């Protein structure tokens, strides 16, 4: 049997090479270096057996219908899979896979810590200050930041990424660790002395709060007006998970009213927009106590190649009649 595969965006070559080496595979890749326009996506998936999608493609009923009933698999090039309608996929017996791995978790954990550092040590602000020639004299109070040492970090979600962040902060910076999760993580407690807290208690006690939960109906706007009010005025919030976990409007208000000290964001509620509704004048971009990266927490050469390889391996397992390693 021949399998037609559509890849919705150029990806690093390791996985592509694996797919190309298999004689049963007919590969078609969207060749422009941009997000595929929706209409083009709907056109190109027609007749395909497998779609290798990136996280910005909404893979829903419309795409399944456009592809046709022969569609068998969605290999999502991402850890998150909130872009895929799993209920609809299940109804149609379409297999969905993602690309979680130690490598990607390490990358995201490192990026999370980079954002924490950038905030606490005011790196981006200091860089801007220095570049424009404002550094005229050393000063005892110039750009004072915050230490990690013996501070408390609250981790919401202790899967592979959250746990990776915990280990680094515990082993490297002697931080006190609080965590919240849907269930107790006794291994993490044993290894790092992490203490379980309700979300409310975690928010009240933490100097840094970092989000590592998937986007689900239950985590949508998990952090909103009420939660910001629980946080310390000196606390920093970091999000390398998914934008809608934070109510962005409430975040801007909390930052403006100085209910929290700052935020480090890699993901946004209406990505790639930084403001969901530009007319609202949400000015995250103008705030000095905010560090912004463009959903690049896993953007390292190593990780993006690994994701490419994993997506391809899942496809190869599937066409070999085996259960793919990363079914969701
Ligand atoms: C990135 O956000 C991913 O889910 O892989
Ligand atoms: C700072 O540069 C110091 O020497 O304390």
Image: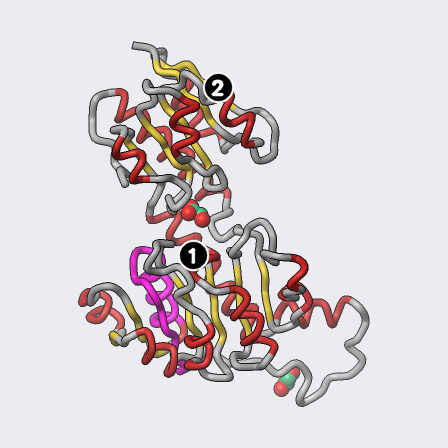
Q: Which residue corresponds to the image point at 57% horizontal and 81% vertical from the top-left?
A: 258
Q: Nearer the viewer, residue 217 or 97?
A: 217
Q: Where does residue 208 sit, x and y in percent of width and height? A: 44, 75
Instruction: Write down the residue under mark 1.
Output: 241
For label 2, being within 8 Å of ligand 1 is answered: no
Q: Nearer the viewer, residue 91 or 3?
A: 91
Instruction: Write down the residue under mark 2.
Output: 28
Please tell me whether residue 151 belongs to the stretch shown in magenta: yes
Q: Where does residue 184 sit, x and y in percent of width and height? A: 20, 67
Where is the C terminus found, in terms of image quarters? top left
Q: Which residues are magenta?
A: 149-172
**Helix, strand, or loop for circle 1?**
loop
Q: Which residue corresponds to the image point at 29% horizontal and 29% vertical from the top-left?
A: 94
Label 1 neighbour load within 10 Å: few <14, some 14-19, many 20+? many
Question: Which sits earlier in the primary sequence, circle 1 or circle 2?
Answer: 2
Q: Where does residue 325 sit, x and y in percent of width and height? A: 25, 36
Where is the N terminus found, in terms of image quarters? top left
Position of 14 relative to 278 (above/below): above
Please tell me whether residue 63 belongs to the stretch shown in magenta: no
Position of 98 relative to 228 (above/below): above
For label 1, being within 8 Å of ligand 1 is answered: yes
Displayed quadrant of residue 47: top left
Q: Which residue corresponds to the image point at 52% horizontal and 70% vertical from the top-left?
A: 250
Number of marks in picture: 2
Label 2 neighbour load within 10 Å: few <14, some 14-19, many 20+? some
User: Mark 1 and mark 2: span between their CA atoms?
Assistant: 30 Å
């Amino acid at each position: 049997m021949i399998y037609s595969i559509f890849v919705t965006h150029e990806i690093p070559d390791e996985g592509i090479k694996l797919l190309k080496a298999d004689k049963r595979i007919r590969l078609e890749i969207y060749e422009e270096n941009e997000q595929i326009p929706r209409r083009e996506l709907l056109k190109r998936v027609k007749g395909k057996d497998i779609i290798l999608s990136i996280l910005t493609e909404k893979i829903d009923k419309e795409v399944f219908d456009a592809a046709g009933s022969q569609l068998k698999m969605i290999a999502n090039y991402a850890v998150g899979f909130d872009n895929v309608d799993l209920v609809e996929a299940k109804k149609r017996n379409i297999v969905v896979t993602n690309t979680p791995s130690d490598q990607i978790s390490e990358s995201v954990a490192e990026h999370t810590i980079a954002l924490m550092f950038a905030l606490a040590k005011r790196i981006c602000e200091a860089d801007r200050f220095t570049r424009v020639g404002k550094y005229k004299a050393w000063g005892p109070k110039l750009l004072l930041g915050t230490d990690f040492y013996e501070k408390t970090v609250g981790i919401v979600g202790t899967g592979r990424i959250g746990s990776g962040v915990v280990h680094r902060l515990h082993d490297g910076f002697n931080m006190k660790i609080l965590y919240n999760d849907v269930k107790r993580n006794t291994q993490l407690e044993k290894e790092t002395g992490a203490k379980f807290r309700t979300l409310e208690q975690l928010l009240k006690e933490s100097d840094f709060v970092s989000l590592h939960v998937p986007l689900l109906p239950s985590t949508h706007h998990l952090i909103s007006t009420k939660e910001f009010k629980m946080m310390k005025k000196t606390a920093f919030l970091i999000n390398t998970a998914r934008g809608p976990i934070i109510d962005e409007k409430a975040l801007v208000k909390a930052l403006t009213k100085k209910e929290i000290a700052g935020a480090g964001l890699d993901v946004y509620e209406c990505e790639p927009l930084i403001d969901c509704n530009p007319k609202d004048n949400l000015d995250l971009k103008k705030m000095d106590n905010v560090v912004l990266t463009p959903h690049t927490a896993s953007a390292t050469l190593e990780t993006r190649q690994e994701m490419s390889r994993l997506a391809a391996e899942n496809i190869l397992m599937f066409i070999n009649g085996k259960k793919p390693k990363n079914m969701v």
